[in-house]
Image (cartoon, helix red, strand yellow):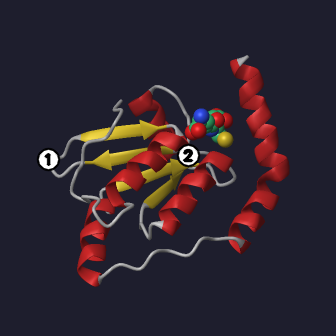
């Protein structure tokens, strides 16, 4: 069953990848505009995050659209073609599953958050509203 799901998504990525990328490009959400000081704080927080992704993974695109909508600058690594990134992900989480968000806290501790919906909830909760606290580092599920 796992193998079936894996190949199913591989085929989806292969066949629908270009369509997904094009659709994503023409419907890219507009980023929210914040006052410069708030955006600076958020940029500082997101500079400690890395998104591991595959270019044509629909779940990764979903997360990247959230980043765009929330005006979050998060570095990304291609865990499909970049062997070092792939191995890093595998070593840290025990599996190559993307998207995965690596969050390094200000105390240096590192957490790995998997599942697109969990990542989106985390980003939305931390950066998504006027009252959100961008310095609140706690993440819901750590590896
Ligand atoms: N439920 C997961 C699904 C993630 C998923 O299936 N990702 C695929 C890529 S589309 C994956 O990591 N496949 C691993 C592989 O193909 O090696 C989520 O929402 O993030």
* Mark nearer the N terminus (1 vs 2): 2
**Residue at figure coordinates x 35%, y 60% from the top left:** 127
**Residue at figure coordinates x 76%, y 65% from the top left:** 23
User: SS at mark 1?
Assistant: loop
- Left of 5 or right of it: where is 91? left
Q: Is mark 1 within 8 Å of ligand 1?
A: no
Q: Quadrant of the N terminus?
A: top right
Q: Quadrant of the C terminus?
A: top left
- Left of 2 or right of it: where is 127? left
User: SS at mark 2?
Assistant: loop
Mark 2: few, some, or many residues within 10 Å (few <14, many ≥20)?
A: many
Outermost bottom residue? 36
Which marked residue is nearer to the observer: mark 1 or mark 2? 1
From the top left corner, tell me how far across and down residue 142 is, in percent: 33, 32
- Asked if marks 1 and 2 touch (Cβ < 8 Å), the reply is no
Residue that badge 1 annotates: 107
**Image mark count:** 2
Q: Which mark is residue 79?
A: 2
From the top left corner, tell me how far across and down residue 102 is, in percent: 38, 46
**Can you tell me which quadrant of the image ligand 1 is in?**
top right
């Amino acid at each position: 069953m796992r193998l079936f799901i894996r190949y199913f998504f591989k085929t989806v990525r292969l066949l629908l990848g270009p369509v997904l990328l094009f659709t994503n490009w023409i419907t890219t959400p507009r980023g929210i505009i914040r006052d410069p000081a708030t955006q600076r704080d958020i940029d500082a927080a997101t500079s400690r995050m890395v998104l591991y992704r595959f270019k044509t993974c629909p779940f990764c695109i979903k997360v990247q659209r959230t980043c765009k909508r929330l005006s979050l600058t998060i570095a990304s690594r291609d865990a499909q073609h970049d062997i070092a990134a792939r191995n890093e992900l595998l070593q840290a989480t025990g599996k190559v599953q993307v998207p995965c968000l690596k969050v390094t806290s200000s105390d240096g501790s590192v957490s790995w958050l998997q599942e697109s919906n969990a990542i989106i909830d985390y980003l939305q909760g931390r950066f998504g509203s006027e009252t959100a606290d961008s310095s609140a580092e706690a993440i819901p599920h750590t590896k």
